[in-house]
Structure formats: C-alpha cells, structure tokens
Image (cartoon, grey):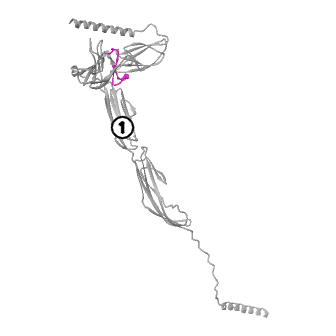
Amino acid sequence: MIIRSIRFFVATFLFIAGLDVSIAQDAPSDHSAPDTGKVHVDVSPEEAYIWVDGKPMVHRSSYLKLTPGEHKVAVYNYGYKPEVRTINVIAGEAMEVSAHLIPVDEKVSGPWGRIQIEGVPGTALVFLNGTTPEFFVGHADEMNNHIIGDQQLIVPVGTHQVHVLAKKTEQEIWTGPVEVKENQRVIIYTKNRPDKQLVYKRWSEGAKLNALQRFEAGTATARIVVAPVRGSFVVDRQEIKCGEPVKVSWESTDAAHASVKANGQVLGYGQTGYLNTQPKENTKYEFRAAGPGGIVTADANVNVDTTVKTSLTPTNPEIRYVKEGETVKEQGSTELKWTASNADSVTLDPIGPVKGSSGSQNVQASPSQSGPGPIDETVTYKISATNVCGGSDTTTASVHVIGSIAPEQVAAVETPALPTTASPLPLLALLGTIFLGTGSILRRTRGK
C-alpha cells in the first residue's frame, strides 16, 4: 500500500513537472530575433499538432519563431478535419493564427484492439500506415500505459505499419508491422530485443464497447479510436476490342490517400471518382486506398483484342474490255465488297481511303495495254486496315480482264471502170442520127 502511494505521488510529480515544462516551452519570449517573426498558433483541441512547411513542430497552442516570408501552417488531430493556412511572416513582427478544428461526426464501431507504445519520448509522433500528416494519430504520451487516467489507441483488427518518429527531426525511433487482434492489447516495448518487442494481453473492455467517438481527451486521459478504411473498385468491362471504352470507378471512406493506376501509371487520385478510359493494350488496373485505419487494395485486368480482320471479294472475277480505234465498244465492271473489323483506318489500293467497317466499290475494266491486240490481264486490288492498338491486316483480290483493242476501220472510195469490149454500133448510130439532123437543117436554111 505504501509502495503504491509512493508510486502515485512520484507519477503525479512527474506529470505536473512535464506539464510545467510544456507551458514554459509555449510561453512567448519578450523579444524576437531581428531576422525572425513571432507566430502564435492557437489550436483546439489542445492536443492538436502543428506542422510548418511539412515539418512537425509541437503539439498544443504555441509560439513559433519563423523566418520572414511565406509559410504553410497545418494543424492536425485525429478525428478532426485538418486546417492548413498560408501565412506571410514579417521580421520583428508578431501575428496570430487560430485553428479550431471541426470534429468528424461519424462514430467508429469494432471489431478492434489496442496498441500501446512504451520506451519512447512522450512527444514522439505516432503514424499508422504512412508518415505524412494525414496518417498521424497522436503523440506517444496519448497511448502509453496510463498512470493517472486511461490513454488508449484503439485500432481496427488487422496488420498495421506503425511508425514512431522523433519530434521535429522526424528521425525514426521505431517502425514495423503490428498485428492487432480482436479484444487484445498489443504492447510495443521499443527498447526490447526484436523478438520480445510485441507482447499481447487480453483487453476484455473491447468487447463491451459500442460505437465510439474518434477522439476524446481530458486532463490526463486520451482515447483515440481509428476508423477502418473501406473501399470498392469496379471495372465495367474486362474484354474489349481496340478503341472501346472502359469505365473505372471507385469509392473509399476514411482513406488519407486513394489512387488508381493502369499498368503502373497513375490515372487518378481521390477518395471517390471514376474515369472513362480506352486502353490500347492488355491493362492491369490497380486501386489502393490507405489511411490510419488500414490499406485496401483491389485490381482488375482488361484484355484488349488488337486483331484486325479484312476481306475483299469481287462479285465478278472476270470482265471484258473491247475497243476499236478511239471507241470503247465494251467495258465491263465488277463490285468489290470489303470488310474490316476492329480497324480505325482502311485503305483500298489503288482506290484510296474508305470509311466504315464494310462497304463496296464499283470498278471498271481499264487495261494497261494501249496498243492493238488481244487483252489478257490480271488486276490486283488490296485492302489494308490498321488500328491504334498496333493491329493490322491485308487482303488481296484479283480481277481478270479480257477483250481486244483494234485499229479504226476506214471505208475506200471506188472509181467506175470502162468496159474493154464495148460495141461501136450504138455510137455509129448516134453519130448518123446527128449527121442526118444537121443536113436537114442546112437544106432548109438554103431554101429560104
């Protein structure tokens, strides 16, 4: 009984002495150095921790000496929404920053266990599953063994990576994975040898607790209740053709960071979101949501069919061409029917680009021969198709052209020929008639 009383008074004295030291540290100095400015950061709740430019400084309301210029002051306390302010410090001048944090309303339910940390300075910072301020859960004297009042860090069941870092310097004091078991208290004795550092004890109180607030603190008590990270991840299609869309959506709660990657490359951040993507190759999507209460991961594979298939068929594989001189007497034609699946660029040679996944093209017989003679030629047509995923395919088809080319036919002019054995009698009779007629005319002329 006497020993217990002595322990109580010693513990009380140490607690009060520590409190006095803290107050002395927080008290403002009478004069600021000429090359610094004085910033009083007033925080609520009083256990909140102050970061400056990403570096942890001190918990509770404090006076800080900062170099002139712009600084980012952030205040964190688990179970509250953080506040981040950008301030401009002027040398030799004082300023006030007030950060009254707003509590998160949602309470936390089990199953859970406890983490207790021993053998480190009470000002050491404790993080779960990360080392940025979003993963900060408190300082060590909020979760070591209670002397006067309860000091508890209550954590979801599962394995958590615990980081204990030194104040201001962020030097690693202790780190390692810790399995939290349901309704058990795991004590981390940081100064023991590695195989003796984790000791489990029954924590029957855990089974009696219901929904709890995330943070409660009194004069010598603290209870930090960490919420589990939850998340869901959905990829709406897992088998697609090149160029087809894939919708990736995710949700998470109580995560400090959440991200989605595609084949190792980050696509997006945010606790909740969705993305419409068009993967060009087989893609592995990965979701990760991490917070003090755990890490949730999920993944999904999307297979992309890059295969291009083409076809090219003439309706009439043989056509005729007949030409006489400059006149085409007969010019046959055929229809080329084509298809190109899973393609976004299609060319029909020697015609040129075509659009769509199928179609037809009418072609006429046009032989390369220009001189007279019979025609017997084969014309080859080719369809080539590609897609942005690297797929390609080519198909050829032949058309046989037959016929002829002849010169122009010109008609000859005919001259009538004289008969070689004509009889003279008709001519003599004609001459006799003429002579007799002439004589008769002469006699009549004389008679007058």
Specify the quadrant of the image occupied by residue 248. top left
Tell me the SS state at disc 1.
strand
Q: Going 37% across and 41% down the picture, which residue do you hit? A: 282
Q: Is residue 313 above or below residue 131?
A: below
Please rate how many residues cluster around mark 1, counting C-alpha atoms within 10 Å: few if below 14, some from 14 to 19, many from 20.
some
Q: Is residue 448 visible?
A: no
* Along the viewing direction, whichever of 2 and 249 lies nearer the viewer: 2
Q: Going 40% across and 14% down the picture, which residue do you hit? A: 41
Q: Amino acid at mark 1?
A: Lys
- For the N terminus, give its image quadrant: top left
Specify the quadrant of the image occupied by residue 260. top left
Q: Is residue 50 visible?
A: yes
Taking the magenta stretch, the answer to whether it contains residue 152 is no
- For the C terminus, give its image quadrant: bottom right
Q: Position of residue 79 (x, y in %)?
A: 32, 21
Taking the magenta stretch, the answer to whether it contains residue 133 is yes
Q: Going 48% across and 53% down the picture, which residue do you hit? A: 349
Answer left or right for 115 relative to 243. left
Answer left or right for 253 relative to 93. left
Answer left or right for 203 relative to 96. left
Specify the quadrant of the image occupied by residue 123. top left
* Residue designated by label 1: 284
Q: Position of residue 394 (x, y in %)?
A: 43, 52
* Along the viewing direction, whichever of 277 and 386 lies nearer the viewer: 386
Q: Position of residue 122 (x, y in %)?
A: 33, 14
Q: How many marks?
A: 1
Instruction: Report the span colored magenta.
Output: 120-137
Q: Position of residue 206 (x, y in %)?
A: 23, 21
